[in-house]
Image (cartoon, coloured by chain):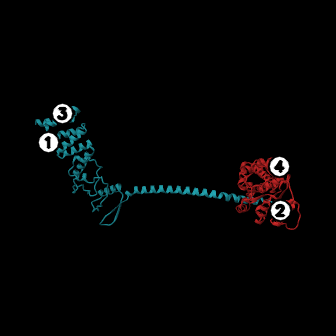
């Protein structure tokens, strides 16, 4: 005699048993997939974290002074500027000058040093706006420290000009040497500049003026006349007139 | 219950070997024709072997049923293990020699030579693997003397194969192996059995998917298939009586087939 309810229960057990390997296999596959996904995500997260760490590194600059043995953590740029500004506004107090790790290419003092002897050339220096040094006193007296780094700068610019033959650099160098009375150099650089680009008016003028200073007035006049015929430059004409007036005197 | 659609099919699959229920399947039919023609040849012994449930007994019964109309055939479906009893029963059934005492092999051979049949009598031995080696040796001697022709069936298992090799291999002139049914053969077997008894509705319920399950569960064993179908139709009869709404008359439910398999022990749950 059949016992149907019991048979149905046994059948249910049998089905669960028969499906168990499939369920187990599916579970293993799903678990593996989840694990792989988590592993990949974790890898990406670690990469991101390491890259942010690399980016964050420069924000915390640790400067260790040898004598004091204390660590001063400075936030660069803005904090630095704020500190400088506050130092300027304060009354002169014995200030502790901390050697600050400043960005490499920021020329620090050269412009302020020459306050006592202002030179026009300063306007054309291709450097960021001048920063006030923490050593500047509020009584606006010219700094006693004088560092002539201009020579170094002009050599650097000359090197750059050699490398890239930029006519504007050539003009700058020619102007610099003319202003400093190095007329030979001024002549040479003006000539080089004109060879690279013969449409720069100021270069021609410096070239002509240098020749006059070197005693080659006639050659200077000829050059100017030639330039005037090509460019119809008023400045060149005025210069030529001035040469002629000086000559007549 | 009497008028249940499934009660008649259920009875069809009761596991009884009856030559009248013999279902003709191409492969089995071919085997049977081979067997029949082998019997007509002057062979001493014919071996019919195969795995359990491949239809050996049914084939032997069918052979007995068919041959007994024309010649002397004796069917030993329940093995006679005792040697003396074996010879005594054979002498009685074939030669009509009644003796309550044991008969020696010599006496039996003398008896056989004394009685003349137009055709050599045939003895059909089912489940021959149950006979002892000594008895099998006597059977061989009787067949060598051409007193009797033997058709014997053997289960083909590893052990029984050894017996077959030892006792019969060199002496048998014909051996026929029966195979388990393929799904197609099983389908033909079940449907023919149902259609033979006009159970058209139930026969139509059996589709290929059902047959696949039945074949997988029974491994093509006819005996197991009979048992499974019997349980299945018993189950359907029960549902028809108690929960007719659960029966789908278009096809057999795989769940019920599996439940029947659990009941018959084909599935261990």
Q: Residues within 10 Å of mark 3 (few under 14, many from 20)?
A: some
Q: Secondary structure at mark 1?
A: loop
The mark that comes first in sequence, 3 or 1, is 1
Q: Position of residue B237 (x, y in %)?
A: 81, 54
Q: Which mark is residue B197?
A: 4
- Can the viewer see residue A211 in this picture? yes
- In this view, the residue in front, A242 or B100, is B100
Name which residue lies at 80% across and 62% down.
B79
Q: Chain of mark 3?
A: A
Tell me which residue sits at (50%, 55%) in the image.
A41
Choose mark 3 or mark 2, whichever is in front: 2
* Letter of the chain that mark 2 sits on in the rendering: B
Residue at 37% across, 59% down: A60
Q: Chain B in the picture: what colour?
A: red
* Residue at mark 3 to residue at mark 2: CA–CA distance: 156 Å
Question: Which residue does the numbered mark 1 point to in the structure image?
Answer: A214
Discs 3 and 1 share one subunit = yes
Q: Residue furthest top?
A: A229
Chain where mark 1 sits: A
Q: How many badges with numbers are in the image?
A: 4
**Residue marked by disc 2:** B109
């Amino acid at each position: 005699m059949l016992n149907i309810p019991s048979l149905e229960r046994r059948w249910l057990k049998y089905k669960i048993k028969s499906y168990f390997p499939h369920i187990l296999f599916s579970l293993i596959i799903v678990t593996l997939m989840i694990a792989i996904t988590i592993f990949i995500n974790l890898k990406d997260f670690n990469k991101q974290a390491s890259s942010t760490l690399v980016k964050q590194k420069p924000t915390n600059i640790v400067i260790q002074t040898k004598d004091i043995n204390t660590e001063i953590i400075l936030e660069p740029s803005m904090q630095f500027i704020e500190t400088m500004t506050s130092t300027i506004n304060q009354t002169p107090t014995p200030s502790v000058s901390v050697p600050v790790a400043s960005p490499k290419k920021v020329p620090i003092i050269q412009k302020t040093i020459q306050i006592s002897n202002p030179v026009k050339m300063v306007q054309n220096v291709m450097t960021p706006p001048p920063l006030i040094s923490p050593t500047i006193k509020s009584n606006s007296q010219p700094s006693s420290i004088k560092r002539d780094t201009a020579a170094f700068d002009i050599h650097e610019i000359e090197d750059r000009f050699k490398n890239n033959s930029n006519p504007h650099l050539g003009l700058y160098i020619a102007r610099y040497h003319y202003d400093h009375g190095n007329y030979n150099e001024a002549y040479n650089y003006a000539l080089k500049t004109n060879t690279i680009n013969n449409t720069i008016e100021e270069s021609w003028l410096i070239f002509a003026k240098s020749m006059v200073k070197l005693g080659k007035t006639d050659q200077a006049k000829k050059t100017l006349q030639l330039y005037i015929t090509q460019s119809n430059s008023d400045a060149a004409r005025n210069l030529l007139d001035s040469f002629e007036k000086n000559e007549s005197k | 219950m009497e008028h249940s659609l499934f009660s008649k099919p259920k009875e069809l699959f009761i596991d009884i070997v009856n030559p009248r229920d013999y279902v003709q399947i191409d492969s089995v039919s071919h085997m049977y024709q081979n067997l029949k023609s082998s019997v007509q040849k002057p062979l001493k012994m014919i071996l019919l072997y195969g795995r359990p449930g491949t239809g050996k007994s049914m084939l032997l019964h069918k052979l007995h049923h068919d041959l007994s109309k024309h010649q002397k055939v004796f069917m030993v479906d329940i093995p006679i293990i005792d040697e003396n009893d074996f010879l005594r029963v054979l002498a009685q059934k074939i030669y009509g020699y009644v003796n309550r005492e044991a008969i020696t092999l010599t006496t039996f051979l003398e008896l056989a030579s004394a009685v003349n049949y137009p055709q050599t009598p045939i003895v059909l031995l089912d489940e021959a693997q149950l006979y002892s080696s000594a008895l099998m040796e006597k059977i061989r001697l009787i067949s060598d003397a051409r007193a009797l022709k033997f058709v014997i069936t053997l289960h083909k298992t590893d052990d029984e194969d050894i017996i077959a090799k030892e006792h019969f291999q060199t002496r048998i002139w014909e051996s026929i192996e029966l195979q388990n049914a393929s799904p197609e053969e099983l389908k033909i077997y079940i449907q023919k059995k149902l259609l033979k008894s006009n159970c058209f509705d139930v026969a139509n319920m059996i589709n290929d998917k059902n047959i696949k399950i039945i074949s997988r569960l029974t491994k093509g064993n006819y005996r197991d298939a009979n048992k499974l179908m019997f349980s299945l139709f018993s189950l359907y009869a029960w549902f028809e009586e108690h929960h007719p709404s659960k029966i789908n008359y278009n096809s057999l439910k795989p769940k019920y087939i599996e439940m029947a398999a659990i009941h018959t022990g084909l599935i261990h749950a």
